[in-house]
Image: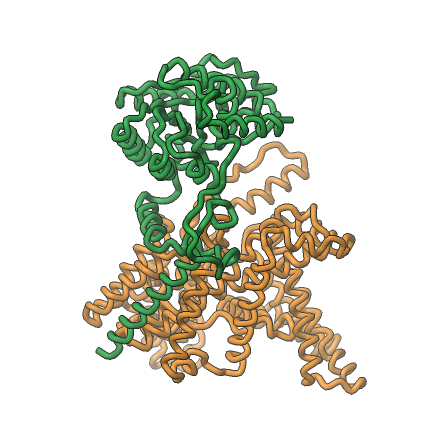
Amino acid sequence: MKNVFKSIMFMIILFFLIIIITYFLLPRDSVRKYGIIKTSVYEILGEKEDSIDAVVIGDSLIYSGISPMEIWHNFGITVFDLAKSAELISSSYKNFEMAIKSQHPKLIFFEGNVLYRESKNKPWFYVWEELYKTYFPITKYHNNWKKYLFTNLNDSMNYSKINIYKGFKYITKSKPGKKLDYMKEKEKIEVPKENQEYFHKIYELCQKNNVKLVLISTPNMKSWNYGKYLGTKDLALKYNLEYIDLNINNPLNIDWKTESRDAGSHLNYKGALKLSQFIGKYLKETNLFTDKREDSNYASWNEAYDIYKEGLK
Amino acid sequence: MSYFDVIYFLAFLPGVIIIYNLLPKKIKPFILLLASFAFFFTYSKWLIIFILLSSLSIYLAGLTMQKIDSEKKEAIKDLEIDEKKIIKAKYLNKKKIVLIITALFNVAFLFYFKYLGFFKGIINSILKLFNINGSLKIIHHLAPIGISFYTLSAISYLIDVYHEKYECENNYFKILLYLVFFPTLVEGPITRYNEVRDTLFAGNKTTYKSFCFGYQRILYGLFKKIVIADRLNIFVKIIFTDYMHFSGPIIFLGAIFYTILLYMEFSGTMDIVIGSAEIFGIIIPENFKQPFFSKNISEFWSRWHITLGLWFKDYIFYPVSLSKGVKKITSKIKELFGPRTSSLFMGAIALFAVWSLNGLWHGAGYQFLFFGYYHFILILLGNIFEPLIIKICHKLKINRENILYKLMRIIKTCLLIFIGELFFRANNLTSGIEMMKRIITNFTFKGFNHSVLTLGLDIKDYIIITLSLIFILVISILKEKNIEVRESLSKKHIVIRWACYYALILSIIVFGAYGEGYVPVEPIYADF
């Protein structure tokens, strides 16, 4: 009995020690050095509340192919790329859930490539990961000991990091893509069941927040194919959603010799100009958005564009 | 599920401990067996069939050999000595056939999963060399987890039963648990049946002490892996991938870091393995004994991966050195060159066999063979020159027991080990040679400080690594002096005791190299 009591006491004290240390280590800024490194995901929190018109959820195809600054410059619509390299749909859902707390976009594009990316881990792993990261945030931010073990503890969280690229990554290098027949007809590939479950959650979240959800497959000759196109089309039909495919017959006239950065896997800046133009035009034609280029509340976007433009080589 | 997963030590292990202790003594080993199956399944799913086949084969072979023995005893009962010899030899031959067939059956699985591709590659190279058309298709198969470890344990059981070192086991489930026991399954140690049977099947209850000591050992292992090995992994990965961009000292630092990483990962895993078993009152042999205090390569290998070294010693070194063929040759050499040369020769032949197999056991690749022969040559040279060095020391009046002299020997051994591990970690033999070339030809400290701080580790990381290594060093010195740290600590006042435990737990949580930006070291020995 004495040993049981001792064990319980040991655990209680440990629990309190963890809480105290967590208090010291929680981030007080959204910049990378405070342990928050999924930058574009957190950077949307740095945007002025309710200032984003449309969000594009996806992976590296999105941050390589859609430049929100180009869309802003040409159409006056505010777009943000909520995209991370090799993004899993489970993370997409969580990131979207977080973003929608401060932003109320009218339209969401969802990139089809994410629908087909499967995780090595089982779904319960993510539930478990989420649990301990939520209840033991120290496991997520433990590395902050490097930054500020004993700084001002009364500071509240400050999302100071604002990304002038709005999630886009400016890459100009070029490597020709050769697999020109990548959209030749083949059998349908079903969206994996677990991913369908997450997509359903995203759909429900959009419904709840009155957001129009549009499925899109952007130009990609390495991992996209006709089978995936058919699978995504089926999913769109199931939910009665609009699906834009930009691969069959190359509707954007992507010149794969010069407009891909890595042999057809991702677009480079030149390719991104075409895709961004398409997205901007599409958004404009929905008549859901007003042109905000003259709106003084959006002056920071014009300033960001000037910096962005200077950065272009 | 890896031993370093939170799921393992906070969910799986506690779950097994609870169920194990709730059930009667007789059922307890079955719980361990079921838990081991579940554990195996998380890694290799239906490949479990292979461990079932291995265990069944050695179980049946053991029974058959036992039967042959009892038939032999019956047959020689009333015979004359000369007749006895003939009959004994006949039965021994029968046993030998059983032993060889069963051993080959087990080795065949190991060969199929681990070496088939490598040897097909060699055949293809030979075909190409002689301009012969056609090549063998190389398919990489997913091997059952721990096959290199449990196959050696299985063979040790067979040979021991053959030599009547102990009686064979009549209960199949005990043999199965011996091979599949979840703490030792993935990375060993390579246990002997007679070493573990007394505690493995005893169904000992978990006591407060065994629970605390077990988890303390697990925490120590976690500290080594998560705070040190995973942190060093960032630096090591960069160096071994892009070695062509770095100067000699940086590459050599990479080799040193890799050696430390390997030790922390492997010995950390052993701490978790031994600690996990300890909770169930099961004693598992130690696999490390402060290897970096070794004064020569031979000693190093008697302190590093001890159970593998002992396996090779018992089942390869002695049988080879005492084999008829080797004895014949050595007796001739003895006549011609004297006893020392003949004993050196005998040792060399046996060592060559041991290190060829040791290299191959570590992996199917030329760099692993090189790794084996590198140590073979070092040990052989050590054996050849040791009398000469003793003579020189004597003449120069150098006291070999002097602490400085010992320290010099330790440093020399460490340097040789670092070089060996460089080849071991290199992507292939060519990369290893290139790295060594760069160490020698591009040995400049220009930009060293800058490089060291831009390869994924900052000054704070180096501080943590240094403090952690000092902590491990202190523990190692205490162990070397035969001081049982956990026992000593348990006698201290509760405040001191708990402060130490909290410090260890919290330092793993806070200073651990996990989460965003870190890539944990894969269980290195699990691939062997």
Q: Residue at coordinates 61% horizontally, 67% vertically from top-left?
A: B351
Query: Is residue B203 or residue A288 the one in the foreground?
Result: A288
Query: Taking the image as drawn, is residue B147 in sight?
Result: no
Which quadrant of the view contains residue A173?
top right
The answer to whether residue B386 of the structure is visible from this angle is: yes
Q: Is residue B64 above or below residue A83?
A: below
Q: In the drawing, does residue B51 fall left or right of residue A32? A: left
Q: Which chain is orange?
A: B
**Residue B249 on image: x %, y %:** 71, 57
Q: Quadrant of residue A189?
A: top left
Residue at x-position 69% and y-position 52%: B435
Using residue B387 as the reference point, say whether residue A276 is left or right of it: left
Task: Using the image, determine if residue B224 lies above or below residue A312.
Answer: below
Image point (29%, 63%), residue name: B14
Q: Position of residue B243 (x, y in %)?
A: 67, 48
Estimate the x, y position of residue B244 in percent, counting from the top left.
69, 46
B204 versus B448 height, above or below: below
Chain displayed in green: A
Q: How is the image coloured?
A: by chain
